[in-house]
Image (spheres, coloured by chain):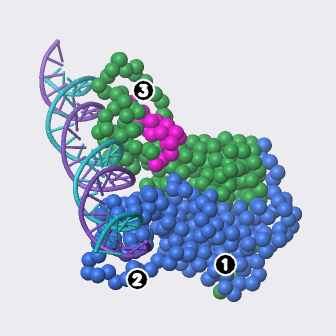
Chain colours: A green, B blue, C purple, D cyan
Amino acid sequence: MVSLVAPKSLKKTDAYHHGNLRIALIEAAGQLVQESGIESLTLREVARRAGVSSGAPYHHFKDKAELIQELVWHRFERLEQAYQRALLGQTTPQEKLQAVGVAYVMFAVEHPADFRLMFRPEMGSPFTSNNPACTSVFRTVMQVIDEFQLAAPRREQAAMGVWSLVHGLAALLVDGPLQPLSHDLAQVRALALGVTSLMNLANREGQPMQEETN
Amino acid sequence: MVSLVAPKSLKKTDAYHHGNLRIALIEAAGQLVQESGIESLTLREVARRAGVSSGAPYHHFKDKAELIQELVWHRFERLEQAYQRALLGQTTPQEKLQAVGVAYVMFAVEHPADFRLMFRPEMGSPFTSNNPACTSVFRTVMQVIDEFQLAAPRREQAAMGVWSLVHGLAALLVDGPLQPLSHDLAQVRALALGVTSLMNLANREGQPMQEETN
DNA sequence: ACTATGATCTAAACGTTGTCAAGATCCCAT
DNA sequence: ATGGGATCTTGACAACGTTTAGATCATAGT
């Protein structure tokens, strides 16, 4: 719930102390990611953009990884906001589920650099992180799933299935063979709706297509 | 279809020329990835392991990225082999589809470092690459989907849906909240089967759960 | 009001990395 | 055998992450 605002106190023409460097660094990092992806996200360049020396960030973050993690958390807050916007006015479980799924995919397509950053495996998976911003995103999905009131084994299957489906589709659109489609937002929306429609979440008993393959 | 074999000519105690450096480098890189992930995959360390100087690799690869790409292609060959192994003895489309899906997930869980490497976005997505090893993997999935003989709009939905589902589930298992489950291979297998069972690929007409959310 | 304490920033350095150029060494075809 | 091309080494360069020592400021306690 940290708000990314500009330094509030007008710096007196050139203050030795920046005033709000921590936030300025996160903002610079975010801007840098959006411009040229994460591979060109350099701590020194971030410091440079914030008008500060190379060692300055180390008084606010112990690591480059820590700065990035903080940035990732801010992006998860945005995703959660997109969820909530999408859920407005939806009433039935089906509506809600599709709204959240589409919001997830749209977020990925509209902010591909952020999406890549958020799910970068090597720096602390957001899933396993216990940051409230990350967990709330996934809790929201779970709440929607629970409205289906599925029986015991089917509930977890549905959760993982929907989750996998949406995340996988987003990945395919952002970095995969569906990349060419990703600039046409209306088409992406239709695609996300169509794919989610394959999910069978009716409250019948769990009957896999086949029990075991061998 | 490049075979990763040791240098065939026994080096005469200390040859100035390595004899088969290109392949030795790829092998060293693969070993390094498996040991400590991709973030510690250093061109210099690769050269070090191959017993060669830091500049030597540049006579075989123009880039660090090119070496990695080559390694990725080898891993896609392994995935394709896993596909083919899984398809043995499967006859119905459902069986084949689940076999391929489970093989995909199992591959990811059994070789997480390789999986992460293969789908690393920043160095040339394997999807869009026209390397035969990568394309054949995805072509195999498509062939299985086609056996369902779905109607026109449903066919693509099914392909993307299955693909997304399996890839997403693998991602969740390798880097996500399902990571704790990933060491129990039997459980992973059951999970993959259960989740795929949610896919409704019956040849009915395409009827999305809802046409448009707003 | 004055100072000292801690927070913040700079400057400079260290080790490491990717990459390249110049030269050494070896293999092979002529 | 010999010269040319392939292969490897050496040494260098810039950039990076990180650390240390010291400079500068803000402010709490007197």
What is the C-alpha distance between the residues marked 2 and 1?
37 Å
- What's the residue type where badge 2 is placed? Lys
- What's the residue type where badge 3 is placed? Pro
Give the residue at mark 3.
A7
Q: Chain of mark 2?
A: B
Could you classify mark 2 by the number of other residues whose Cα lies within 10 Å: few (under 14), some (14-19), or many (20 or more)? few
- Establish if D11 lies above or below B159: above
Whether discs 3 and 1 lie on one chain: the answer is no
The secondary structure type at the circle numbered 2 is loop
Image x and y of residue B45, in percent: 33, 64
Whether discs 2 and 1 lie on one chain: the answer is yes
- Establish if D10 lies above or below B73: above
Whether discs 2 and 3 lie on one chain: the answer is no
Q: Chain of mark 3?
A: A
Q: Chain of mark 1?
A: B
Who is closer to the viewer here, A106 or B56?
Answer: B56
Q: Are marks 2 and 3 in contact (CB under 8 Å)?
A: no
Q: Quadrant of residue A44?
A: top left
Could you classify mark 3 by the number of other residues whose Cα lies within 10 Å: few (under 14), some (14-19), or many (20 or more)? some
Residue B196 appears anywhere in the view: no
Quadrant of image for the C terminus of chain A: bottom right
Image x and y of residue B202, in percent: 82, 70
- Residue ID at (71%, 61%): B160
Q: Say left or right for B180 vs A47.
A: right
Who is closer to the viewer here, B124 or D7?
Answer: D7
Q: Which comes before the other along the chain, label 2 or label 1?
A: 2
The secondary structure type at the circle numbered 3 is loop
Give the residue at mark 1.
B99
The magenta-colored residue range is A20-39
The secondary structure type at the circle numbered 1 is helix
Give the residue at mark 2.
B8
Image x and y of residue A182, in percent: 68, 48
